[in-house]
Image (spheres, helix red, strand yellow):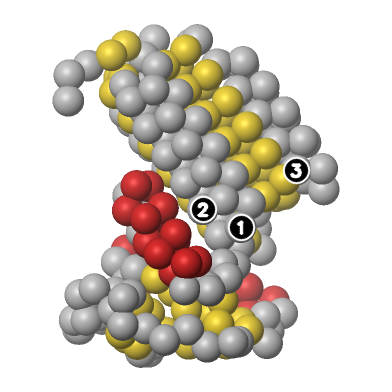
Amino acid sequence: MKNLVIVGAGGCGREVLQWVREINNKEQSWNIKGFLDDNLYALDGLNCNVPMLSTVDSYEIQKDDAFICCIGNSKIREMVVKKLKSKGAHFATIIHPSAVVADSCTLGEGCILYPFSLISDHAEIGDGCIINMYSSVAHDSKVGEFCTISAHCDVTGMCSLGERVFMGTTSNMVPGAKIGADAYICAGSTVMSRVRAGAKVMGIPAKIIKF
């Protein structure tokens, strides 16, 4: 059994701790080793009964370690994952027992699938993505590496997302819509066609707004 090291002791990391415990309730899969966080006091006053191991940079990787990065910011998540991989780290994909994952889909390394998320037929999810609760990626859609799809989002069929895209809560895409890398889709927005790389959009239909 692998020792799971959770990178990031903020809200996402603590949520993933709960999902891993629920995975273990179904089938003992992970020994939860503890957290890495640059704020060594991030867990103070919280009842999670899991140790803070060290900062990211000072942690010495052991042969039975598997990592999951729970940093919400996509760019920082990518940076931390690459830093740990350069030191020999291997990343797990965490799938809550209630998630629905098609046999034909492709999941990258280090992804997190929250409760009641759905990855449908021949969808492709890149490394390091977070798919939050009640969000779906429909058939033949492609999600680039280190995307963050918030709760209650709908990526419909044949859509594509570039790397590090952020989709806010309840945002959605019509079939075949495309979002470029590093774009930010505000909560409640609907992408009707294309969003250029790096754009921040809001509304129905989603339109570019200033940062």
Judge from the rendering whether residue 124 lies leftward or rightward of residue 181; answer left or right.
right
The answer to which of 126 and 139 lies nearer the viewer is 126
Q: Quadrant of residue 106?
A: top right
* Front label number (3 vs 1): 1
The answer to which of 74 and 192 lies nearer the viewer is 74
Total marks placed = 3
Question: Considering the image in quadrants, where does the C terminus appear?
Answer: top left
Q: Which disc number belongs to residue 128?
A: 2
**Separation of marks 3 and 1 at Cα, in angstroms:** 13 Å
Tell me the residue at 46%/42% (across/down). Answer: 147
Question: Considering the image in quadrants, where does the N terminus appear?
Answer: bottom right
Q: What amino acid is found at the position of numbered circle 2 in the picture? A: Gly
**Marks 2 and 1: CB-CB under 8 Å?**
yes
Q: In which quarter of the image is residue 124?
A: top right
At mark 2, the secondary structure is loop
Q: What amino acid is found at the position of numbered circle 1 in the picture? A: Glu
Q: Earlier in the sequence, mark 3 or mark 2?
A: 3
* Front label number (3 vs 2): 2
**Separation of marks 3 and 2 at Cα, in angstroms:** 16 Å
Residue 21 image offset from top left, x and y in percent: 55, 78
Q: Which disc number belongs to residue 109?
A: 1
At mark 1, the secondary structure is loop
The residue that mark 3 highlights is 105
Tell me the residue at 50%/30% (across/down). Answer: 162
Residue 104 image offset from top left, x and y in percent: 82, 43
**Separation of marks 2 and 1 at Cα, in angstroms:** 6 Å
